[in-house]
Image (cartoon, helix red, strand yellow):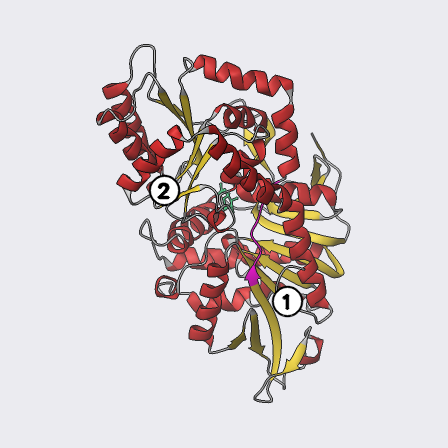
Amino acid sequence: TTSETAATEAYELVIVSNRLPVDRVVDESGQASWRPSPGGLVTALQPVMRAEDGVWVGWAGVADEEIEPFEADGINILPVALSEQELQEYYEGFSNDTLWPLYHDVIAQPSYHREWWESYVQVNRRFADAAAGAAAHGAVVWVHDYQLQLVPAMLREVRPDLVIGFFNHIPFPPYGIYSQLPWRRQIIDGLLGADVIGFQRVADAGNFSRAVRRLKGYETRGPIIEVPIDSDDPEAGSHRHVTTNRHGGLVRTVLARAFPISIDAEQYQSLARRPDIRARAAEIREELGNPETIMLGVDRLDYTKGIGHRLKAFGELLRDGRIDVEDVTLVQVASPSRERVETYRQLRDEIELTVGRINGDYATLGHTAVAYLHHGYPREEMVALYLAADVMLVTALRDGMNLVAKEYVATRVDEDGVLVLSEFAGASDELRQALLINPHDIEGLKDTILQAIAMPKRDRVRRMRALRKKVLTNDVARWSASFLDALTRSAHGDHPLQDP
Ligand code: F6P
């Protein structure tokens, strides 16, 4: 439900992210409506925002539309407009064809274009201005993800009174890769405008600190980065937590450490207990012809997710007669994503060709090998799918966290089901009791899939119980509370080095 109440007050909490929790969709007749947007960032932040009275600054998912502030499902929304050209250069270009492949270990080749960079700077400035205009004096502003890395410094420049946090939802690459970026110093300066910079994994925070040392020569002490300030700077006194370093120089301290993101686990659990959703799970099994084993993959259609590697392993298992199409079905939900970016188009063609081949070679009239769905689905349907799946396959080649892995675990109130999880997904740092795999090792992946299919019930339960404990304890409320706590404490000159 959305209503057009103006959100023009000054807020104590401002969330800034490229994408809003709702996307504007305009149908062929010109009728506009809103639908929930895809991706882990929105999944994680929505419950945080519902619980706090703040405002969410972001883009509504369509070009060339000026939209007034409004309220959606109890969340105040302040839309930032993007032109068609900015959509191409800032979003599809610099964010998703430069930074995205670069930050995901150059799985695809990043493109470097100076016009894209200029657009990135310009759009980051617009987001910073919108946030500055919405924030009360001394407010907390929490900026999210790689599309907006310049916003922290831009904000600090115009509003030194604000407490600024930044959270990176995707990996931060090792220095040898990061250093390709022609604008590598500007991005570091942009991020260092924040008081607290959060990453998914300890390794990401380490990669960032190393880049700071190598590119800026700043000193770091554990998770604390010392950013020198010019003592002639008339604003020097207005900076927060300024101290003198061991060389007697004036420094501002910035905290950069891991805060692994999570989901609203309780919501998934209660959906999993709903009789209608349980009935739907049984119906899904029925519709698939009641195979002994249902395997499931759920991803945005992205080359980082290792969908091709998963299909290769599955196809070879069928080819070699190690599994039978009568017994095992793979359901692959691939939600549409960034469809105008060439690498994503190519990926779609590749995946759909592979799915077609596998089905052509191995399916029978009664049994599909791969049930491929190029759609996004409402949460209720996803929970039914998770409940129907004996084996969940998360085979990302690189992933900041991968919340699908956590959703599957939270859904399994019956303590059954096997999670196969890539060690290249951030979730593998916490979910140690999953069957951890290297997706590049196709033989290893095939063996692990067979192990998952054959796992005795008591082992499944033992592993799932341990996984559930992790996900239910470290839920998204705890994640945001610990980040915001670090941020407020930093405003008082105190840097918590690890979780309380
Ligand atoms: O979680 C990473 C992320 O890139 C988010 O920033 C983003 O909203 C989501 O994935 C989905 O991607 P997009 O907004 O480009 O559709």
Q: Which residues are magenta?
A: 257-263
Which is more toward the observer, 245 or 301? 245
Image quarter (top left, top right, bottom left or bottom right) of the C terminus: bottom right
Which residue is located at x 60 percent, y 55 percent? 143
| Location of residue 155 in the rendering, given as x and y in whole percent from the top left corner | 63, 63
The residue carrying mark 2 has its beta carbon less than 8 Å from ligand 1: no
The majority secondary structure of the magenta stretch comes to loop
On the image, which quarter does residue 222 sit in? bottom right
Amino acid carrying mark 2 in the image: Tyr
* Label 1 packing within 10 angstroms: few (<14), some (14-19), many (20+): many
Choose mark 2 or mark 1, whichever is in front: 2
Position of 497 relative to 4 (above/below): below
Q: Is residue 336 visible?
A: no
Identify the residue shown where x is 42% and y is 74%.
Answer: 214
Discs 2, 1 touching: Cβ within 8 Å: no
Q: Going 74% across and 69% down the picture, which residue do you hit?
A: 492
- Count neighbours of disc 2 (C-alpha within 10 A) and say few if under 14, some if 14 to 19, many if 20 or more: many
Q: Secondary structure at mark 2?
A: helix
Q: In terms of depth relative to the viewer, which is nearer, 295 or 149?
A: 295
- Residue 187: % across, % down: 48, 64
Q: How many marks?
A: 2
Would residue 459 be counted in the magenta stretch?
no
Q: Is residue 420 left or right of residue 441?
A: right
Image height of 31 relative to 195, above or below: above
Q: Quadrant of the N terminus?
A: top right
Mark sitting on residue 303: 2
The residue at which mark 1 appears reads as 156
Q: Position of residue 139 (x, y in %)?
A: 73, 59
Whichever of callouts 2 and 1 sits on the residue coming sooner in the sequence is 1
Which secondary structure lies at badge 1?
Answer: helix
